[in-house]
Image (cartoon, grey):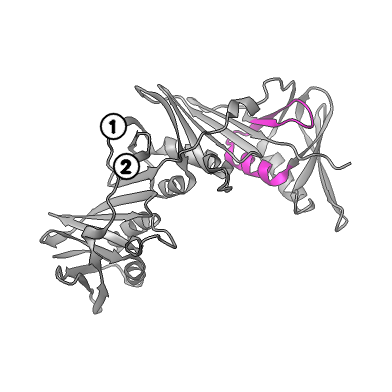
Amino acid sequence: MKFSVSSSDLLKQLQIAGGAIASNPVLPILEDFLFSVKGKHLTITATDLETTIVTSIEVSAEGNGIIAVPAKILMDTLKELPQQPVTFNINKENFGIEITSAYGKYRLAGENGKEYPQIPEADGVDSIELSNQALAQAISKTLFATSTDELRPAMTGVYVEVDFNHLTYVATDAHKLVKYTFNNIKSEVSTNFIIPRKALNLLKNALSSGGILSLSFNKSNAFFEMGNVKMVCRLIDARYPDYNAVIPTDSTNQLSINRSDFQNSLKRIAIYANKTTNQVILNINDGSLTVSAQDLDFSNEATEQLACTYEGEPMTIGFNAKFLIEMLSVLESDEIKIELSSPNRAGILKPVDEVEDEEILMLVMPVMLNN
């Protein structure tokens, strides 16, 4: 089996697929890409058994076949080559691989492609279509709020609720929560599932700026197909917490403020906050918001005052500055509103100007005030 391809085009596809390869794979062959040549197409597969990425590229080939190619040495070689045609010559007897470039020859040992794990098939699936941009938006608005606590597996992914023409994405780590709803889809089903954080990170990198993707799912896996890239991920088999139960519905105090002014103030004040709690204090009165922080261990403190619109009782409440800054960087509205009920209950952040067909709500738990 022999094929030729542009070194840079091949490297681009390998970088997309290579994200699925684990740093410490459970099987040695999972350190490899699976190359499958059929006609004029090279299909590249990479997997860690939880997430699989398949991509394809046109090549000039003689003969069909499959071979498992060591990923790291191949990618390292291609990164050091300027753009040029490279030819792969594969010995089907001993799985030896010889790569020829304008500079010389490189030999590496492949493995039998037939020993590569089988990729899950899309059996008994339901499907929806959505734009690449809509999914990229959903990932960027929710992924930061997922948990890294492996003892709570459900919260290490993004919960997706398909409800006919609504698609709701929820992420929480018990300190902050994001609920993002996209209303413009067509679906025949109503269901829910949890997509792992790693899969969504890889998906974000693989999504192009335009176009439509197909999302199919059954009880075990989700299947994404966009252009020449396919991704399969095993869904998290766990029960997601009842997120609606923690969203306050009786927040009578409402603060409206310029988003970037508030965010920049928090960035400055956070420098003076305790590095363990990142606590900032918001002192809110009619027309005025005072943002302050102090670190008693180092005698550091800072205070700033901002103009705002406020309806409600005067209130003093503490939040983790890092969480607020993350949330404000995801919200796109010039003005944001914060809904509060009491100093020991969660605050709700929303954009003043909603984007058409989208709704976003962010919840942040307070940091108890030091007496």
> Residue at (66%, 37%) from the top-left corner?
259
Indicate whether residue 328 is drawn in magenta. yes
> Residue at (74%, 30%) from the top-left corner?
345
> Alpha carbon of mark 1 to alpha carbon of mark 2: how far?
20 Å
User: Residue 214's x, y, as percent?
Assistant: 32, 36
Task: State the residue position of label 1.
Answer: 124
User: Residue 90's x, y, as percent?
Assistant: 17, 69
Where 280 sits versus 354, above or below?
below
User: Residue 229's x, y, as percent?
Assistant: 31, 47
Quadrant of the snapshot with the N terminus: bottom left
Q: Secondary structure at mark 1?
A: loop
Residue stretch rendered in magenta on the structure? 320-349
Q: Is residue 99 left or right of residue 254?
A: left
Where 345 sits versus 79, above or below?
above
> Residue at (72%, 22%) from the top-left corner?
251
Indicate whether residue 250 is drawn in magenta. no
Q: Is residue 72 left or right of residue 91?
A: right
Task: State the residue position of label 2.
Answer: 226
Amino acid type, label 1:
Gly
Residue closest to the eye, 74 or 269: 74
User: Residue 116's x, y, as percent?
Assistant: 27, 57
Amino acid type, label 2:
Met
> Residue at (37%, 39%) from the top-left corner?
221
